Image: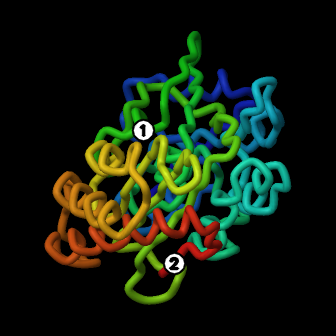
Amino acid sequence: MTPFELAEPRTLREAAALLDTDEPSVRPIAGGTAVMLMMKMGVLRPARLVSLRSIEKQYSGIVSGPAGELRLGAMTTLSALERSAAALKHAAVISRALRSLSNVRVRNVATVGGHLAHADPHMDLPPVLIALGASVTTLAADASRTFPLEQLYAGYLETTLGRGELIAEVSVPRQGSRRAAYLKCTLRSADDWPALGVAVALDTDGAEVRDARIVVSAATDTPMRLAAAESALRSARVDDAALRRAGDAAADEAAIVSDVHGSAAYKRQLVRVYVARAVRAALAGNPETRD
């Protein structure tokens, strides 16, 4: 690795100010699982790293908000989120998805904010949180904003974050009786990068779906909501015919890409099958994340 400067600000706003620079190689570092790997590979050669490990502790907590929402500080580790009783009660699908995310050594240091901001479409948490309707609050040196998590992603490894803008918090709205599931298809071990991830959240009335949110990832360049598949399920009774319509709509709508995990044609068929499976898993309360 090439030499670099390490800055250790005490506040998130101070960190944002240090990142608001014309030098494009300056990067923030939280858990460092992605940044250090990229540096070792020579893909990233930063002039300065801005460490977030000494910022305010409020950004490392998991709390319930006044409207029943779950608030996740950006510096919360994935292991802390996985073990959180509040998260398990709020939306058990979050904890279940994390159990097969990489390995425990990574989850012990990787943070929620870094995981989301890295914008690798193979990450497990973004589709789950998008399906749950999560929003992100960001902070810059002199401003802040809140927007739906699905608007964070602009392309492969690209976000809509501005220069000097950092994720501060993720808010997951109260789920009530909504049912959710996340399934992924991996070609080797359960914690391998997935060829496809599918997250669904359903608002049901008996056997009828009142509303649905369906998100695919890994097979696409960004986590992608599938409006046509959602529409195919909305106000429908869940049976084999409805699931076929939703799966076909999802396969037609998703912007599938080929990569080392499979061809676009192969992954399109996976989408067709896994959307139906994920809906069934959500309705059944299935704890499995890998099928």
* Residue 273 pos. (x, y %): 32, 73
What is the distance, in whole Å, between disc 2 and disc 1 at their CAs? Answer: 23 Å
How are the colours assigned in the image? rainbow
Task: Tell me if mark 1 has few (under 14), some (14-19) or many (20+) residues whose alpha carbon lies within 10 angstroms of its own.
Answer: many
Q: Is residue 276 above or below residue 288?
A: above
**Residue 191 image-quadrant placement:** bottom right
Q: Visible in this render: residue 39?
A: no
Residue with the mark numbered 2 = 290
Residue with the mark numbered 1 = 150
* Residue 234 pos. (x, y %): 39, 44
Where disc 1 sits, the SS reads: helix
Q: Residue furthest bottom?
A: 188
Q: Visible in this render: residue 271?
A: yes
Q: Amino acid at mark 2?
A: Arg
Q: Is residue 257 above or below residue 270?
A: above
For the residue pair 205 and 197, the one nearer the viewer reads as 205
Where disc 2 sits, the SS reads: loop
Q: Identify the residue shown where x is 77% and y is 56%.
A: 88
Q: Amino acid at mark 1?
A: Glu
For the residue pair 208 and 253, the one nearer the viewer reads as 208
